[in-house]
Structure formats: structure tokens, C-alpha cells
Image: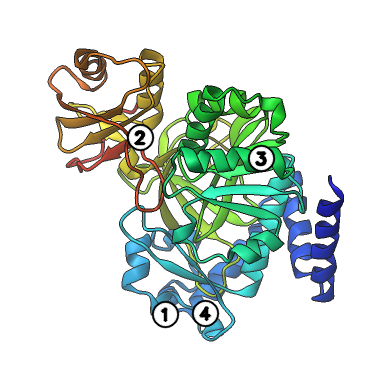
């Protein structure tokens, strides 16, 4: 740790101590629970009691077990905004977190002071598990134009903010120059952005040891294995995967050398439910991620369907502590022509094996048998028939495939890149998954 990092770390904890150590108390609790593997069980009952006592929406469920509470989503939150707010925190002094609306439903969630401190403590703890410590310099790449964070405030926290809403060679050059000059220890960004930067580093002959990085954190998009390998080779350090959202915070994180995502059961209660119903999914199956935030008293989120899909590891079902993978959102799963589900990871693996020099692709399903493959070719051109043959083998011989060849595939308005998009809604649940 550099001298400057030590000063910042001491300053942070010193200021926290002046305010009676609210972050330190939460941090020690998170660390103890995660180390011992003990979920915050009593806090679950406390949040249920608080929600039924102080919110209009949950009042009818007073005394009920969590299984009797309704499953909610962003649409429900927007339609019944005031009903979710606790009367105990109906005033100034709340912190607002807004989602980007990548699912088509942006929403703002207010957080009380303890929830805010809990989220900070979660971040400190999970950063430490991957080798990045409070006070170290972080280079954070995202579409900063869409976020209200003050650049001055970020600098105070030793964060270098790089806006990637428009990612071109000038931005890539700026990132590399910053890494070479500013003693950065960690890079945080979307996998698509990190993968693009990895290609730039390799193409321009930069050596990994020049960068001096300790870890790269990938977040907000599905981290595919081949992209992870490319990033690790170019940056010369471990790449870990973080699963988080704006409205809750850090939900899970992998560790160097271990691709499983360890759930933040110190701060959240998790359920993994079937895609076609509300029954628990079996370990190894693709499941909806349903989260109960144990610490946001201002706007209790109980059985909140995040819109994400994940595969639970074989460590057990209700008491699982890890995910095998996060497969993106429900709109990131396509269906073959007979209704079988195909995850973005399956598509990515096939494309990577068959087209090793492919720069970018995006598979869009518009109807039951209608698909579009958007391709940004790398240095080697592939005939259109090669793409059609591969996709017919994956999706079905009767798949209607339209090919679009582009210089670059644009990101979403949120700055995220989605390799798989499904605009087709099947009539009923599917029984198969690949």
C-alpha cells in the first residue's frame, strides 16, 4: 500500500470514528457473518415486522412468514411508489439510488442512513476479499455522463473516473496512459469495455507487467469465460466477477481463482425461483434471483424480483452460499425453435469456439423462429454461411436467421453491451435449458 493510500485509509476510519463509527460497526458485522457463513437471520424478521408496521403496501401481511409476501418487481414499485415508503423515514436526509432503466423500467429507491452505511461496508469487505483495499487507487470505467457523481468527490475517494459512453481509441489511450502513470491498483468496468481495452493493449504491444494492477473487477454484464481469459492475459492480474445492482448494492462476488459468486448473505436474503412459476428452482437450474434487502428501512424491498437469472451452485438449495454463474437478465435468454431456453453463456461459448477472431456479436430473437445476428468482424472475414450454419445447429434447422454486418455494435443507453437480446415472449414455461 502506498503512503497516500495509507493516509486516505486512516482518514476515512478517523472521520468515521468521529461520527461514532457507523460504517465500522456495519463492516465488522458483515465480515463476521461472511467469515462464519451465518446469514443475518434475526434481521429478516425485523425487516418484515418493520415493513408491515410502517408501510401501506406490506401492512396486510402482518405476522406472515416471508413465503406469504408477494413477489414484486420494478413495475410494481413504480405503480405503488408511495405505498412502499416507510412512514418512519418520510422526510429529508435520505439517499436516492436510481437504476439506469436497462430493463425498460427505471426506478428510484430511497435509502436510510444505516442502509447507506451498510452498502459502504459491503463494498469495503468485498473489495478486500479480492485484494483491493480502502485507500488504494481505483480506475472506474462507465458511462459517467449518466451518473450524478461529482468528479471532485470521486478524486477525494482516490477514484479516477473514465467515461466510456463513447469508447474510441482516444479514450482507450487515455486509460492506458493513466494506468502507466497513476499507480492504479484496481480497474472496475463492464466486461465489454474491459474486453475492448484488452484488445487495444494487445494490438499496441503493451506488456501486462507495465500496468502494475492487482485486480480487475467486472460488473453489470455477464462475464463470459473467453472474455475473462482475454482480460487476464492483457492486464496481467486476476479478474473477478461482481454481481450488484443500483437499488440494492453488492449481491455477490467471485474470488481470485474461483469463478463461483459468493452471495452477500450478511445483508440480503435470497430466493432462487423457477422461471415459469414461483416454486424454488433446483441447484444447477436456471433461476430467477429474488432478493430481500435486510437493511433498507426507508423503502423495504421484500421478495424483489431483480429481473436477473442465475444458476445456483450445488452447495445446497435454500442455504446455498454461491452461484455457479449469473446469466444476465430474463431478456438475455433466447429460445430455440421448439421452445428450449438457451443462455447467453451457451451462445457466447459457441461463438468463441467457432469464431475466435470475432470482435463483437449480438443475437436478437424477434419471434418464435425469427432471429437476427449482428456481427462486427475482426481482422478475418467469415462467410455469411458459416454464421448461419452454426446458428441453425444451435437454434434449429427451421430458424429464420438474418445477418447484419456492422463496424461496431452500439451499447445500450445505460452504456452496457448485451450480446443476447430476446424480444419474444413464449406462451408458457419452457422445460429445457442449455
Residue bearing the label numbered 4:
53
Q: Residues within 10 Å of mark 2 (few under 14, many from 20)?
A: many
Q: For numbered disc 3, what is the local secondary structure?
A: helix
Secondary element type, mark 2: loop
**Given this view, does label 3 or label 2 mark the residue nearer the observer?**
3
Label located before the other in sequence (3 or 1): 1
Nearer to us of marks 1 and 2 is 2
Q: Which residue is mark 2?
A: 419
Q: Residue at x 29, y 39 (%)?
A: 421
Of the two numbered discs 3 and 2 on the same chain, state the one appearing first in sequence: 3
The residue that mark 1 highlights is 56
Q: Reading the chain from its start, which is encountered first: label 3 or label 4?
A: 4
Q: Is residue 260 above or below residue 304?
A: above
Instruction: Kindly report the distance in space between the C-alpha atoms of the residues bearing marks 3 and 1.
Output: 50 Å
Image coords of residue 341 (percent x, y): 29, 31
Q: Earlier in the sequence, mark 1 or mark 2?
A: 1
Q: Position of residue 388 (x, y in %)?
A: 20, 18
The answer to which quarter of the image holds residue 372 is top left
Marks 2 and 4 in Cβ contact (< 8 Å)? no
* Residue 192, placed above or below residue 59: above
Residue closer to the observer: 153 or 318: 153
Amino acid at each position: 500500500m502506498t503512503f497516500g493510500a495509507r493516509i486516505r485509509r486512516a482518514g476515512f476510519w478517523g472521520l468515521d470514528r468521529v461520527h461514532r463509527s457507523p460504517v465500522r460497526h456495519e463492516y465488522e458485522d458483515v465480515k463476521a457473518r461472511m467469515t462464519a457463513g451465518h446469514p443475518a437471520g434475526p434481521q429478516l424478521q425485523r425487516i418484515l415486522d418493520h415493513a408491515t408496521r410502517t408501510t401501506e403496501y406490506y401492512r396486510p401481511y402482518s405476522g406472515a412468514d416471508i413465503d406469504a409476501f408477494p413477489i414484486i418487481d420494478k413495475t410494481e414499485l413504480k405503480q405503488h411508489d408511495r405505498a412502499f415508503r416507510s412512514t418512519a423515514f418520510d422526510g429529508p436526509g435520505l439517499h436516492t439510488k436510481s437504476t439506469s432503466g436497462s430493463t425498460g423500467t427505471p426506478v428510484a429507491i430511497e435509502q436510510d442512513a444505516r442502509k447507506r452505511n451498510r452498502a459502504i461496508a459491503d463494498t469495503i469487505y468485498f473489495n478486500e476479499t479480492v485484494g483491493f483495499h480502502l485507500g488504494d487507487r481505483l480506475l472506474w470505467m462507465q458511462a459517467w455522463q449518466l451518473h450524478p457523481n461529482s468528479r471532485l468527490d470521486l478524486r477525494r475517494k482516490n477514484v479516477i473516473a473514465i467515461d466510456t459512453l463513447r469508447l474510441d481509441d482516444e479514450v482507450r489511450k487515455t486509460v492506458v496512459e493513466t494506468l502507466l502513470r497513476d499507480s492504479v491498483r484496481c480497474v472496475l468496468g463492464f466486461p465489454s469495455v474491459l474486453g475492448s481495452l484488452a484488445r487495444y493493449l494487445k494490438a499496441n504491444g503493451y506488456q501486462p507487467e507495465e500496468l502494475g494492477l492487482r485486480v480487475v473487477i467486472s460488473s453489470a454484464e455477464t462475464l463470459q469465460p473467453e472474455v475473462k481469459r482475454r482480460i487476464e492475459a492483457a492486464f496481467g492480474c486476476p479478474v473477478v466477477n461482481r454481481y450488484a445492482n443500483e437499488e440494492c448494492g453488492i449481491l455477490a462476488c467471485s474470488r481470485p481463482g474461483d469463478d463461483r459468486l459468493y452471495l452477500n448473505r450478511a445483508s440480503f436474503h435470497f430466493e432462487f425461483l423457477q422461471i415459469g412459476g414461483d416454486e424454488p428452482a433446483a441447484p444447477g437450474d436456471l433461476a430467477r434471483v429474488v432478493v430481500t434487502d435486510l437493511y433498507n428501512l426507508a423503502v423495504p424491498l421484500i421478495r424483489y424480483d431483480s429481473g436477473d437469472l442465475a444458476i445456483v451452485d450445488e452447495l445446497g438449495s435454500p442455504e446455498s452460499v454461491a452461484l455457479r454463474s449469473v446469466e444476465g437478465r430474463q431478456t438475455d435468454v433466447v429460445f430455440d425453435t421448439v421452445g428450449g431456453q438457451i443462455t447467453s453463456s451457451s451462445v457466447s461459448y459457441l461463438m468463441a469456439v467457432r469464431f475466435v477472431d470475432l470482435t463483437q456479436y449480438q443475437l436478437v430473437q424477434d419471434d418464435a423462429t425469427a432471429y437476427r445476428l449482428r456481427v462486427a468482424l475482426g481482422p478475418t472475414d467469415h462467410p455469411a454461411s458459416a454464421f448461419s450454419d452454426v446458428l441453425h445447429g444451435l437454434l434449429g434447422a427451421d430458424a429464420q436467421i438474418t445477418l447484419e454486418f456492422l463496424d461496431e455494435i452500439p451499447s445500450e443507453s445505460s452504456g452496457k453491451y448485451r450480446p443476447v437480446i430476446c424480444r419474444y415472449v413464449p406462451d408458457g414455461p419452457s422445460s429445457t435449458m442449455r
